[in-house]
């Protein structure tokens, strides 16, 4: 049972605020489906009774009932869709909030455990799939049980033998057909989401690394790699389609068998006087409408498989352990002095990345971290920014860094990555990421401080496409000016810049870091720094 799956049960706890709406939607859905059955039954009775040409008053109740059931079917269905989708969308909002709250402490050191394309699939497609839990699984089952039971009772009241036939056919359609589709298509359906995520990841990688793949002559090989994933996905989809087609054919067969069975027992019952002839049409045609209540259970079986797969993938995000957890009783830093003694750290999925780093950074002191590539310089910055667990003695404002809450650390320490992220907006919006309430005058002053005269309303394009490398670095420094944190961490700010631009950026850093503590990762000594600290890869001499 899908509701007993541990992952689904875990996510249903997030859906609880919408449970009341789902019950209302279930009742409305049952009324809509019941109106269809009632419309078929009353219409059949009305046509048969009208053939006998009785006084019109004898038909008046049936005529009004046909109108009521016809109108009610549409009204109840509309109300059910409105209420159920509101409940489902509210649940999706709660789920997205829970997932983003989990992703925030994972960034940036914990996110490499998920491929970018795969993570995007989980956050978009898998979250959307969870709406099927209520819309395509729970509600149809409730309606099928309620309406199917009512239809069997009505048919058995008219003719007991026909009630038995209808009950058997509904059980076959509601249990055997979904079981068939699970048996024939379950594996294919369950494999689709991971394969789609893998395909998205591979295509995204190919788009990002396209020029390098072409230059290296590896584009054909990578294309075959994508084709292989696509072929496996197509095979899984074909398997699902075959099972779905078989279940549909079997459903039609069961529905037809129900009608034939009704004819075989109803006609002799009319001849024997056990069934009023007018009710013959009701007994024979009722299975056509009643079977609608279980016909949706075959697609529901596929939806249940999708939900179970998506729930498992989303729970993996919820269960992911952040590289750093806030302490139960966080302390407050007293000042912004940074001290490191024997600092060692590693990423969750890798070996020790840096070890044995020592330095003392009083307020206003500026140091550089130097060393060969891969020695762990950027790892030290991740530790100081509160993104990564460490061993050794690392203190901020006299407090052990692990005793401080992450938000408290980052209220004192500003980390600027090697390539500052630029949002697809204008210059002003990018700057206000550092200080949302900054005025235009403050923004212009920050740009002037880094030597970057620029129109605040200038669009920068996706990933800063309209900016040069130097402009992008200075825009990141302008954010640092606005944020005004006492400790500034810069990760190779002159990387990939030509010598004149690199020197201009260094001059800007020297200006904006005056009076603030600075840790800058660099490959070359910087003359105006107070100290250079060498970082070595563990195990290397």
Image: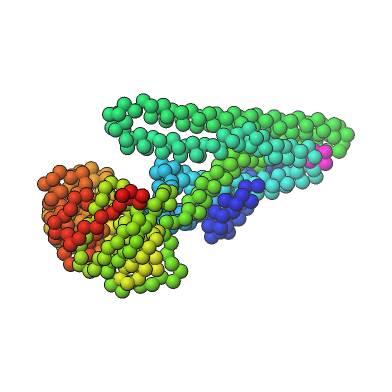
**Of 389 and 132, the residue lying toward us:** 389
Q: What residue sits 36% from the left and 25% below the top?
A: 220
Dominant SS of magenta comes to helix
The x, y position of residue 250, in whole percent, is 67, 30
Q: What residue sits 77% from the left and 46% below the top?
A: 153
Q: What residue sits 22% from the left and 52% below the top?
A: 522
Tell me which colouring the rendered structure shows.
rainbow
The residue range painted magenta reads 158-163
Q: Is residue 267 above or below residue 66?
A: above
**Of 78 and 463, the residue lying toward us:** 463
The x, y position of residue 262, in whole percent, is 77, 33
**Of 238 and 20, the residue lying toward us:** 238
Q: Is residue 227 above or below residue 60?
A: above
Extreme residue toward the front, this view: 541
Magenta highlight on residue 49: no
| Left or right: 336 as drawn, with respect to 134 | left
Q: What residue sits 59% from the left and 28% below the top?
A: 242
**Of 529 and 98, the residue lying toward us:** 529
């Amino acid at each position: 049972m899908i509701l007993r799956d541990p992952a689904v049960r875990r996510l249903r706890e997030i859906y609880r605020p919408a449970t009341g709406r789902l019950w209302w939607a279930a009742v409305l859905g049952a009324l809509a489906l019941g109106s269809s059955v009632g419309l078929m039954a009353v219409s059949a009775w009305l046509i048969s009774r009208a053939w006998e040409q009785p006084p019109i008053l004898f038909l008046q109740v049936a005529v009004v009932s046909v109108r009521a059931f016809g109108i009610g079917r549409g009204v109840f269905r509309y109300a059910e869709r409105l209420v159920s989708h509101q409940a489902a969308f509210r649940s999706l909002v709660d789920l997205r909030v829970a997932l983003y709250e989990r992703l925030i402490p994972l960034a940036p050191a914990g996110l490499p455990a998920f491929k970018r394309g795969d993570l995007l699939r989980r956050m978009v497609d898998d979250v959307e799939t969870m709406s099927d839990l209520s819309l395509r699984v729970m509600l149809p089952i409730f309606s099928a049980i309620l309406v199917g039971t009512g239809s069997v009772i009505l048919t058995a009241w008219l003719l007991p033998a026909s009630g038995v036939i209808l009950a058997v056919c509904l059980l076959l359609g509601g249990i055997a057909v979904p079981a068939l589709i699970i048996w024939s298509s379950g594996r294919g359906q369950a494999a689709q989401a991971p394969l789609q995520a893998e395909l998205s990841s591979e295509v995204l990688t190919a788009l990002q690394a396209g020029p390098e793949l072409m230059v290296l002559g590896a584009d054909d090989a990578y294309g075959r790699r994508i084709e292989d994933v696509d072929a496996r996905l197509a095979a899984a989809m074909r398997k699902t389609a075959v099972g779905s087609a078989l279940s549909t054919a079997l459903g039609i067969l069961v529905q037809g068998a129900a009608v034939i069975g009704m004819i075989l027992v109803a006609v002799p019952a009319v001849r024997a006087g056990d069934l009023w002839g007018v009710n013959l049409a009701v007994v024979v045609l009722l299975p056509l409408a009643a079977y609608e209540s279980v016909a949706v259970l075959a697609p529901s079986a596929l939806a249940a498989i999708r939900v179970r797969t998506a729930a498992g993938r989303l729970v993996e995000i919820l269960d992911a352990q952040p590289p750093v957890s806030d302490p139960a009783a966080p302390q407050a830093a007293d000042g912004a002095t940074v001290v490191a003694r024997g600092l060692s750290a590693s990423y969750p999925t890798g070996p020790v990345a840096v070890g044995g780093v020592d330095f003392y950074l009083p307020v206003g002191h500026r140091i550089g971290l130097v060393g060969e590539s891969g020695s762990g310089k950027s790892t030290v910055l991740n530790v100081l920014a509160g993104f990564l667990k460490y061993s050794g003695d690392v203190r901020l404002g006299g407090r052990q860094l692990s005793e401080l809450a992450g938000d408290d650390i980052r209220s004192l320490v500003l980390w600027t990555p090697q390539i500052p992220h630029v949002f697809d907006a204008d210059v002003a919006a990018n700057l206000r990421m550092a200080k949302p309430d900054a005025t235009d005058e403050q923004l212009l002053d920050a740009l002037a401080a880094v030597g970057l005269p620029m129109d605040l309303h200038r669009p920068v394009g996706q990933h800063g496409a309209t900016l040069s490398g130097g402009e992008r670095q200075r825009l990141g420094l302008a954010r640092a000016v606005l944020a005004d944190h006492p400790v500034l961490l810069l990760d190779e700010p002159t990387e990939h810049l030509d010598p004149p631009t690199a020197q201009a950026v260094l001059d800007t850093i020297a200006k904006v870091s005056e009076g603030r503590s600075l840790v800058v990762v660099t490959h070359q000594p910087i003359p105006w720094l107070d100290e250079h600290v060498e970082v070595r890869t563990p195990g290397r001499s």
